[in-house]
Image (cartoon, helix red, strand yellow):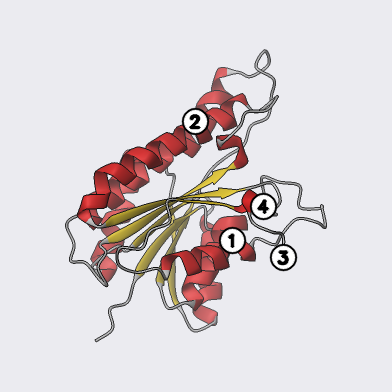
């Protein structure tokens, strides 16, 4: 009997997270669409169900440990396992360092880095203890940015959080590889439309491109693993 694969996607109410959730829903995943805006994640889940898929919307603040742990526990209670975590939730605060206040710094680092850590920890605790399917126990995809590879003026908080996410991914990869849990960094360049980019630019790629890319990435089963995908290195076509 075919085992239904289960995915938890954070920041699924709009932009890249919504695109990934829709793509996975169309590919047969049971998708838990999580995010702070309850109405928006419910809409994403509703779109998946309307297309014949299985999905549920879950309000989630990824910066709160108890809520993250409860969300993962809820996934397992409903579906019996968690195969994929897509860490996409994040915020962007733009200011030169002399004007960057404590609140904006903490909000950015908490959402983009601490939130990813909390979700990855909860997911890894579940994944490493569950039965493997097609040679793997789980896959964590951390959505990053070109700001995680190079800094830029006014991006101190955002860039620092995304550099930190790369370090977190590298460590997770080393710790979890022997337990059959994969970790992939997905570096989404500014060439892709999202709520954090200028969506009015007609030359930017649609968010659905990212959804399709994650879907194809997750189709690699067994020992095959992609440690990092950088959309800035791919041809626009």
Which residue does the numbered mark 4 point to in the structure image? 194
Q: Quick one: SS at disc 4? A: loop
For residue 155, above or below residue 126: above
Say whether disc 3 or disc 1 marks the residue closer to the N-terminus: 1
Secondary structure of the residue carrying numbered label 1: helix
Contact check, label 3 and label 4, Cβ < 8 Å: no
Label 3: which residue?
237
Query: What is the crowding at mark 1: few (fewer than 14 residues within 10 Å), some, or many (at least 20)?
Result: many
Residue holding disc 1: 210
Image x and y of residue 206, in percent: 70, 62
1 or 2: tag closer to the N-terminus? 2
Q: CA distance from mark 1 to mark 2?
A: 23 Å
**Pointer 2 residue:** 109
Question: Disc 2 to disc 4, how far (Cα)?
Answer: 19 Å
Is any part of residue 123 visible from this angle? yes
The Cα atoms of the two marked residues, 3 and 4, are separated by 18 Å
Residue 83's place in the image compared with 115, above or below, is below
Foreground of the two, 178 or 112: 178
Disc 1 versus disc 4: nearer the observer = 1
List x then y, in percent, for residue 170.
Answer: 38, 40
Count of numbered badges drawn on the protein = 4
How far is disc 3 from disc 1 in space, using C-alphas?
13 Å
- CA separation in Å, label 1 and label 4: 10 Å
x 70%, y 54%: residue: 193
């Amino acid at each position: 009997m075919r085992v239904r694969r289960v995915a938890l996607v954070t920041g699924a109410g709009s932009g890249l997270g919504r695109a990934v959730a829709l793509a996975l829903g169309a590919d047969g995943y049971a998708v838990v669409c999580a995010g702070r805006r309850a109405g928006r994640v419910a809409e994403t889940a509703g779109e998946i169900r309307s297309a014949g898929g299985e999905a549920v919307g879950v309000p989630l603040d990824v910066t709160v440990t108890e809520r993250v742990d409860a969300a993962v526990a809820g996934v397992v209670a409903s579906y019996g396992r968690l195969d994929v975590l897509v860490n996409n939730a994040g915020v962007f605060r733009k200011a030169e360092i002399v004007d960057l206040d404590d609140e904006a710094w903490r909000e950015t680092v908490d959402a983009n880095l601490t939130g990813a850590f909390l979700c990855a920890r909860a997911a890894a605790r579940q994944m490493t203890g569950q039965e493997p399917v097609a040679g793997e126990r789980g896959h964590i995809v951390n959505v990053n940015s070109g700001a995680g590879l190079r800094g830029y003026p006014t991006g101190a908080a955002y860039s620092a959080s995304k550099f930190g996410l790369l370090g977190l991914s590298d460590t997770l990869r080393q710790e979890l590889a022997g337990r059959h849990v994969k970790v992939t960094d997905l570096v989404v360049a500014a060439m892709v439309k999202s709520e954090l980019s200028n969506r009015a630019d007609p030359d930017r790629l649609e968010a659905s491109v990212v959804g399709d890319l994650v879907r194809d990435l997750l189709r690699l089963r067994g020992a095959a693993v992609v440690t990092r995908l950088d959309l800035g290195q791919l041809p626009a076509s």
